Image: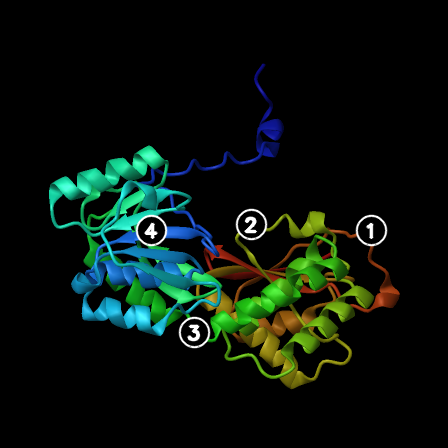
Amino acid sequence: MLASPSQQSERPAKRERVAALATLPLFWPLKSKRVLVAGGSDAAAWKAELLSACGAEVHVYAPRAILSDLFLDVLARGAAHELGRFVHHDKAWHADAFRDAAIAIADCDEQSEAEAFFHAARTAGVPVNVIDKPAFCEFQFGSIVNRSPVIVAISTDGAAPILAQAIRRRIEALLPPALKHWASIAQAIRDRVNARLSPGAARRIFWERFVDRAFLGKPEQGVEMRLMAEADRQVTRPCIIQDEVLELARREARRVPVAGSDKDRSSSNAILVQGDIAALVRKGKNVVRLRSGNPMAVDEEFAAFERLGLPVQIVPGVEAEAYRPDMGSDMGKLAFSGRPVQPGLHTTNH
């Protein structure tokens, strides 16, 4: 049966399929796991240090006489992770070394040794990587940006390692070092925040505000207490826009709360809010400003945007059954910024 045009328009847009991937990116926890590293080269030392930084128990199989100066230094300094440690075996690897290992790494000069290590690992059921020998690798290492617990890994599937390094340098410059501290704070408060704020608009707004803070600078002392106080305020003063309305925005759209009521907002603060929205529009963003009450009672704000040279369209008619006039007109105001489109501002009541 052919659908009518109205029926067709109501169908959800077809989801884009996942494009082809050269490899599957995975993040593999290794805390307190036994791992095997064979060889005494600098390359093997780097892999051993990396594994120990993940909290692994790294068993190094190599005669001490062949350990490089770098490897000796890595062993002397110990693991960066509190759970990580090194166990040096002053001998070459053997079949029993693979027992209970989570993964196995080797740096082999000879092709025959690389092949033997690979097959011994496969026989033991241990994922294996022989450094710089792709034919004997079941997994790969990428370039890493470390803001742990935020970790970014880049891979070119071995096609252009120098490109992966260049990408890593650019990402390093974009991600502030303080991001690791903010991520740790998020870990610490996540369960408490989610216990206070039910899934939906309030929880999403809280975490979006958190993300904005994370890119502004290093967390100040007592920030956890202030964040929890903010979560409590959202419980007592909930957003009155229903999730069904918020979900009309594109999934990738950013939801930004507009603070302050129309009655109490000073002119300087109003200019700040309008300036922020104007900046988004001039970047090519499509902005939707949600307002409560009579959609025609926005003459002052309408005029302010026109003075800034921004085209404005008023779209009335979106209602929220939960709205109560006594709650104030500021509590449900949001602005949405989505993908770049033709500049413009759309305001609507709810």
State how far apart marks 4 and 1 are (Cα). 62 Å
Name the residue nearer the viewer: 16 or 81.
Answer: 81
In the current view of this chain or complex, which residue is farthest to the front? 90
- Look at mark 2 in the image and give the residue it sits on: 250
Inspect the image, locate mark 4, and give the three-letter code of the amino acid beneath it: Leu
Residue placed under numbered mark 1 in the picture:
321
Mark 2 / mark 3, whichever is N-terminal = 3
Mark 4 and mark 3: Cα distance apart in space: 34 Å
- Closer to us: 260 or 28: 28
Q: Is the residue 66 above or below the residue 228 in the image?
A: above
Indicate the amino acid at tag 2: Arg
Q: Which residue is mark 3?
A: 176
Dot 2: what SS? loop
Residue type marked 1: Glu
Q: Which residue is painted at 62% across and 73% down in the image?
A: 303
Of 231 and 339, the residue lying toward us: 231
| Identity of the residue drawn at 39% across and 59% down | 152
**Mark found first going from the N terminus, 2 or 4:** 4
Which element is circle 3 on?
A: loop
